[in-house]
Amino acid sequence: MTGGHDGADAGACDDCCSDCPDGGDPHHPSIFTDDRAVARRDYAKVLATVGGLTAVASLAAPLSGLTRVFERSYTGPVYSDGIYLVDGEGERVTESALAEGERTTVFPEPRPGIERAPTLLVRHPEDAYGGDTKLEFTVAGYAAYSKVCTHAGCMVSNEEGETLVCPCHFGKFDPTAGAKVVGGPPPRALPQLPITLSNDGYLVATGDFEGPVGAGGE
Ligand code: FES
């Protein structure tokens, strides 16, 4: 797992950007440069709306700013207290999974009805967090946010330095400030997930996202 990216990895983003309603920008590399297969599988599984969490809403429709690429149809909690975070292979995430400055995509450990909910896991020095970050939702420098953009539901899969970037319309979020919007059209921050460490050393949720996932939900 790593958070860096380089230009040679632009191809890893082609898959997702070609699915964006307006074509996106295929030249913005994914933040998941060390694991293209996982990134592709992640996106494909989200498109398939596994677990009833999301539904694809007319990818071919012109994007007016209101067209939602992903729309959550499931209204119950995605995470709850004690639900383990797992990586793209389904493995539970240990405290040592990321170094400071790295990030990756995780999911709630599958259980009936809820199998996939793409979640951005970032790690920064604890004193780097401020602004709108709910510090009580962080642990050991880790913070977790929904990966579904609050504008039209694309995956927030790119980065510019520390800033998380949505490739569809360049919505930008600051992961050290509660994933607040710092650029582009998204109307609100990515909802934060409260997390902690389990007694056996894995990252677990202590509740659900603190706000609506994806577009809508004002
Ligand atoms: S879907 Fe428009 S900026 Fe993310």
Image (cartoon, helix red, strand yellow):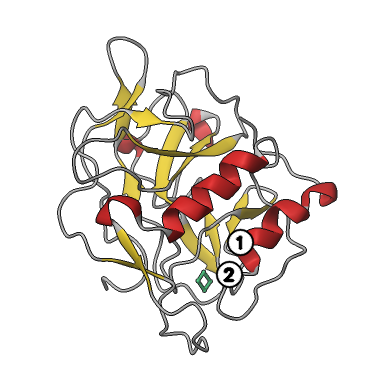
Residue nearer the viewer, 186 or 47: 47
Q: Which amino acid lies under the numbered mark 2 shown in the image of this protein?
A: Asp
Q: Where does the image place residue 126, in percent across and percent down from the top left? A: 48, 29
Residue shown at 47% from the left, 28% from the top: 141
* Quarter of the rendering occupied by the N terminus: top right
Q: Which mark is residue 147?
A: none
| Residue located beneath label 1 in the image | 16
Mark 1 within 8 Å of ligand 1, using the beta carbon = no
106 or 42: nearer the viewer: 42
Left or right: 138 as drawn, with respect to 60? left
Which residue is at 17% across, 60% downward? 75
- 174 vs 113, nearest the viewer: 113
Q: Is residue 82 above or below residue 41?
A: above
Q: Residue at x 57, y 37 (%)?
A: 103
Dot 1 amino acid type: Cys
Position of 45 relative to 87 (above/below):
below
Q: Nearer the viewer, residue 181 or 55?
A: 55
Label 1 SS: helix
Mark 1 Cα-neighbour bin, 10 Å: few <14, some 14–19, many ≥20: many
The C terminus sits in image quarter? bottom left
Whether residues under marks 1 and 2 lie with C-beta atoms below 8 angstroms apart, the answer is: yes
Residue beneath label 2, please?
A: 19
Query: Is the residue 209 above or below the residue 197 in the image?
Result: below
Residue 128 vertical position relative to residue 183 in the rendered view, above or below: above
The quadrant in which residue 191 appears is: bottom left
Image spot of residue 216 (x, y percent):
31, 74
Residue 190: percent from the left, percent from the top?
40, 57
